[in-house]
Image (cartoon, rainbow, N blue to C red):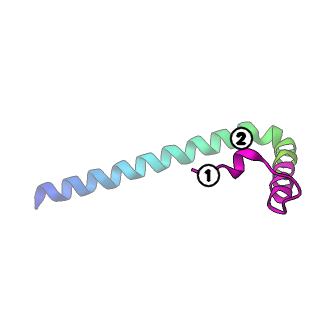
């Protein structure tokens, strides 16, 4: 039973470290991209409009029609 609790603690510590590292990385990346936020919002809006027009069948985007 003693070895089980060590493995459980190591598992929890591993998950904690991974998610803390991911959070720090995303926060750092977000701070770098903050300067370009207006451009990124505009690009995201254009992409959403294009996908909406594709969904409404105004035009087709061939790689979105591909069957796997």
Compared with 31, 46 (above or below) is below
SS at circle 2: helix
Magenta stretch secondary structure, dominant: helix
Stretch of the chain drawn in magenta: 45-68
Mark 1 / mark 2, whichever is N-terminal: 2
Q: Residue at x 44, y 46 (%)?
A: 18
In the image shown, does 35 or 45 lie closer to the viewer? 45
Per the image, the residue denoted by label 2 is: 31
Q: Quadrant of residue 58?
A: bottom right
Is disc 1 surrounded by few (<14), some (14 to 19) or many (20+) residues within 10 Å? Answer: few
Instruction: Point out residue 59 in the picture as x, y percentages from the top left corner.
Output: 86, 53
**Which disc is residue 52 wearing?**
none
Instruction: Point out residue 9 in the picture as x, y percentages from the top left corner.
Output: 27, 55
Residue 2 on the magenta segment: no
Instruction: Point out residue 46 in the picture as x, y percentages from the top left corner.
Output: 87, 49
**Left/right of residue 18 with respect to residue 7 in the rendered view:** right
- Count how many numbered circles sit on residues in the image: 2
**Which disc is residue 67 wearing?**
1
């Amino acid at each position: 039973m003693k070895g089980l609790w060590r493995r459980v603690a190591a598992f929890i510590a591993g998950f904690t470290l991974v998610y803390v590292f991911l959070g720090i990385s995303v926060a750092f990346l977000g701070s770098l991209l903050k300067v370009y936020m207006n451009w990124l919002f505009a690009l995201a809006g254009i992409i959403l409009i294009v996908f909406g027009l594709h969904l409404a069948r105004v035009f087709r985007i061939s790689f979105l029609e591909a069957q796997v």
